[in-house]
Image (tube, helix red, strand yellow):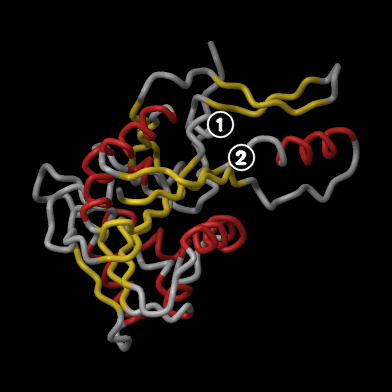
Amino acid sequence: MPPPRRPFKNPSGRPPGPPAGKSSPPKDRGWDPVAAWYDKLVGESGSDYHQHVILPAALRMLDPQLGESIIDLCCGQGVLIKPLLAAKIGKFTGVDASPQLIESAKTRNAADPRVALIVADACQPGRWADASHDAATCIMAVHDVPDIAALFANLARALKPEGRAVMVFMHPCFRIPRKTHWGWDADQKIQYRRLDSYATPVEIPITTHPGKGSGEQTHFHHRPLADLLTALGQSGLAVIACEELYSHRRSQATGPFSKAEHAAAGEFPLFIALKAVKR
């Protein structure tokens, strides 16, 4: 009998889960069931991975300009608000299905007239998708959305012609919950990445609070990279840049395993960042 699998841990800090607003039952309120925990974990400034890997890459690729209007789909509690306002943009619009997360973002940014926060499903039509924004973002949520074509279509609809979009998400080739693992080759003294499957799209349930018995689950939607790029192209977004993002963490231990761990950390990316333009 094989040993039980350990719960998947998402290094982004954001538990894989439903989109910022599932379209079907009206009772669905996005990430409300885990909103308090997620807000405590990520907060205003982001998790460790947000601060050192995800946000620096997103801001570098986005290159926000003075006075621009920027929309963030699946914005959560607004981890992008502070750095974008510091860049002197003209307006920030955040869209998320969780009223609790939107309320957290409002509490932190209520005094700034440049910030507009909307409770809405990012996969459904909305007045916010009005071709008025210079740039759009979707940070660590692409794998949380069951209808990726609808998300990308709304991302494109929200932009002005030639507007740009930046998306950062778990790397679909190397970071699939329960389908990718670390292994150790004692003969060659290397740490390797094992892939059990990749080509098949799959929805993977995740226990948000392992061991607590509270029952909250979220869902990770794995899709091969070709499916994601095709969906982007069909939405009218043309990819013009890509960065693969690696962990900044390194073991403090010494010895052959530690050396191999360091080498592997620089070879297998955690996240992927795409920059696209509306054509």
Q: Residue at x 28, y 47 (%)?
A: 19
**Helix, strand or loop at mark 2:** loop
**Helix, strand or loop at mark 1:** loop
Instruction: Indicate the position of residue 40 as horizontal and vertical percent values.
Output: 44, 65
Judge whether 28 appears above or below 55 on screen. above
The mark total stands at: 2
Relative to 124, is 139 on the left or the right? right
Give the residue at the far left of this rendering: 26
Judge whether 45 appears above or below 58 on screen. below
Instruction: Indicate the position of residue 146 as horizontal and vertical percent values.
Output: 26, 37
Q: Residue at x 35, y 62 (%)?
A: 135
Q: Is residue 200 visible?
A: yes
Crowding around mark 2 (Cα neighbors within 10 Å: few <14, some 14 to 19, many 20+) is some
The image quarter in which residue 229 lies: top left
Q: Is residue 216 visible?
A: no
Amino acid type, label 1: Phe
Instruction: Indicate the position of residue 47 as horizontal and vertical percent values.
Output: 53, 61
Relative to 154, is 186 on the left or the right? right
On residue 14, the disc is none
Q: Residue at x 53, y 11 (%)?
A: 1
- Real-space CA distance between mark 1 and mark 2, rounded to the nearest whole angstrom: 7 Å
On residue 269, the disc is 2
The image quarter in which residue 76 lies: bottom left
Amino acid type, label 2: Pro
* Mark sitting earlier along the chain (1/2): 1
Residue on which the image places disc 1: 174
Crowding around mark 1 (Cα neighbors within 10 Å: few <14, some 14 to 19, many 20+) is some
Instruction: Indicate the position of residue 214 as horizontal and vertical percent values.
Output: 34, 46
Residues under numbered marks 1 and 2 in contact, where contact means CB atoms less than 8 Å apart: yes
